[in-house]
Image (spheres, helix red, strand yellow):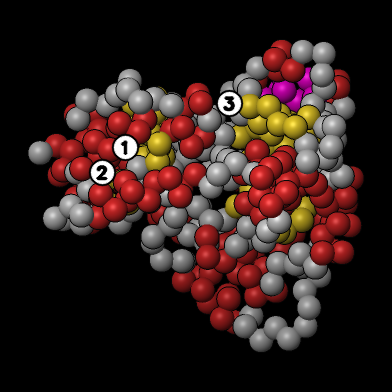
Amino acid sequence: MSGKVSARLPDFPWDHLVPMAERARAHAGGIVDLSIGTPVDPTPEVVQAALRAAADSPGYPLTIGRTDTRQACIDWLSRRHGVAGLGLDGVLPVIGSKELIGSLVGHLGLGDGDLIGYPALAYPTYEVGAALAGARAVATDSLTSFGPETPALLWINSPSNPSGKVLPVEHLRKVVEWCRERGTILVSDECYIECAWEETPLSVLHPSVSGGSHEGILAVHSLSKRSNLAGYRCAFVAGDPALVGELLAVRKNLGLQMPGPQQVAMVAALNDDAHVVEQHARYAARRAKLREAFLSAGFRIDHSEASLYLWATRDEDCWDTVAWLAERGILVAPGAFYGTAGKQHVRVAFTATDERVDAAVARLTA
């Protein structure tokens, strides 16, 4: 990477966590790594079987994706999330949601002189994507903070990573109306939409939010969390066919194509709800154990009504909390990784194995 490009990017946050990880690994009982939300449970057999059956794949896949893959995305959004009115030209399979989020600003032709808005507490890749495109970025939850300027693109994220907050339908509807009045592209990161505990998240594409039109709106979805498919890199973007068409035109030129076998596996995953229910139950049990243990250890849990994280605080600097937990062999992510609004919180993932979760509970309640 050239010095000019790397200078525009923020530091990769997890590099700063290495000393704390080493401290946690030194614990006699080994590390309990709750810092990253990577799945640890098996990929569902129905998905593995579909991948094996599609292994003979000698030809290039189409960038637009297989028809049955796009139809499975449409059917899933309709069946599970009440989205109506999507056609095949409004869906595009992508190689993991992070790749899409990091490249989307540039691929939509935005850059120098354009303003990109993203949440005050946010997954770092929104800022990275703006920086790579040469655009300016503002982290805010207030639509009035833009003043007389109009952002070219606005990111929202519900359920939130890191806080697990779910945006209510009234707020989502207000954001849609605000963006349409100004010609701002609205992109909703909904990768945790099926990881819900105390609230029911709505897609920005739902008729009660969008008014039955997808104009100016995109939603990003991932199978990494719901189906333990992080290693498969299966995701998709859906919404306004004109915006999807712009992304497709660029991705054709770059050869950004989801491999054919993964597309077949994606169909199997989206068409099967049973494994999602089973995985949801596993996470619910781990979440309940960790939540109770952190509360008993003097923490407060804020938001966390959805996603795969607990947003925990002791009302102190997040790095002091990270250090306290590392001494007990527990590694978490400091909230400062997600913006200054998170400087007194830590993000606790409940994606560890049952054995490691139980170890963390024992250490917190000893």
Query: 216 left or right of 330?
Result: right
Mark 3 or mark 2, which has the lower sequence index?
A: 3
Residue type at mark 3?
Answer: Ala
Crowd class of label 3 (few under 14; some 14 to 19; many from 20; radius 10 Å): some
For this rendering, which residue is in front, 320 or 110? 320
Question: Where in the figure is residue 352, as x and y percent of width and height?
Answer: 33, 53
Mark seen at residue 326: 2
Q: CA distance from mark 3 to mark 2?
A: 27 Å
Q: Which stretch did the figure color magenta?
A: 172-179
The main secondary structure of the magenta stretch is: helix
What amino acid is labelled 1 in the image?
Answer: Val
Q: Quadrant of residue 192?
A: top right
Q: CA distance from mark 2 to mark 1?
A: 6 Å
Quadrant of image for the N terminus: bottom right
Residue hosting label 1: 322
Query: Residue at horizontal 78%, vertical 44%?
Result: 133
On the image, the x and y values in percent for residue 210 come to 76, 30
Q: Position of residue 353 (x, y in %)?
A: 30, 56
Rendered residue at 37%/51% (across/down): 18
In the displayed structure image, the side of residue 245 where residue 177 appears, left or right: left
Task: Classify mark 1: helix, strand or loop.
Answer: helix
Rendered residue at 66%/31% (across/down) = 118
193 horizontally vs 114: left or right? left
**Which residue ends up furthest to the front in the rendered image?**
3
Front-lying residue, 110 or 34: 110
Q: Which residue is mark 3?
A: 120
